[in-house]
Amino acid sequence: MDSPEGLASLIVAVATLLGVLWQGWKTSAEVAKLKREVKPVREAIEPNHGSSLKDQVSRIERRQHEMGRSIGGIRDDLRDERAERRALHADANAEHVQINARLDRLERLRGKPERKRHQ
């Protein structure tokens, strides 16, 4: 190492080693910073039996599913009510036809003119 080339090689090697160490330290610092920044996000996302985003989304999904079942039940009830109303309407119309026919017969027996009917 008595030659200037040997000394230059040593200086280059030491400088390279220092550069690599510096870059490693910077990378390590950046990784530590990223870990600190990511930690709150991870804590918010991971289920914790309560306040995490995952838990909140799960509760919302569960409630939506329950509401969907409730709405389905209401639709079924509404369909049944409509069918019952239509059946009552049909029964009422049939009853009116029978009553009108009886009234017409009674009025003919009494000799009255026929009534005007509502259509």
Image (cartoon, helix red, strand yellow):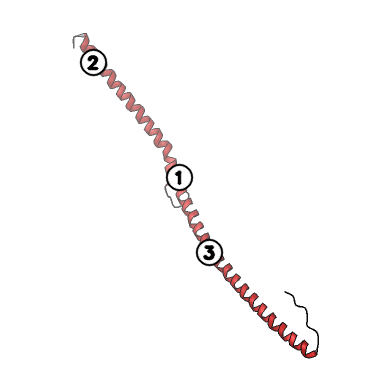
Q: Earlier in the sequence, mark 1 or mark 2?
A: 2
Residue 113 against residue 41 in the figure, above or below: below
Residue 10, disc: 2
Report the residue that reaches farthest toward the left. Answer: 2
Residue 119 relative to residue 51: left or right: right
Q: Nearer the viewer, residue 67 or 44?
A: 67
Indicate the amino acid at tag 3: Gly
Residue 52 visible, this orientation: no
- Residue 61 x/y as whole percent: 48, 55
The quadrant in which residue 99 appears is bottom right
Mark 2 falls on what kind of element? helix
Q: Which residue is drawn at 33% across and 24% down?
A: 22
Residue 28: x and y in percent read: 35, 30
* Quarter occupied by the C terminus: bottom right
Q: Which mark is residue 72?
A: 3
Residue drawn at 56 percent across, 65 percent down? 75
Q: In this view, does 118 lie above or below 27?
A: below
The residue at 23%/12% (across/down) is: 7
From what the image shows, is residue 95 above or below residue 58?
below
Q: Mark 2: give few (<14), some (14-19) or many (20+) Cα within 10 Å.
A: few
Label 3's element?
Answer: helix
CA–CA distance in space, label 2 to label 3: 81 Å
The number of numbered badges drawn on the structure is 3
Question: Splitting the image into 4 quarters, where does residue 107 fall?
Answer: bottom right
Which residue is under mark 1?
Answer: 44
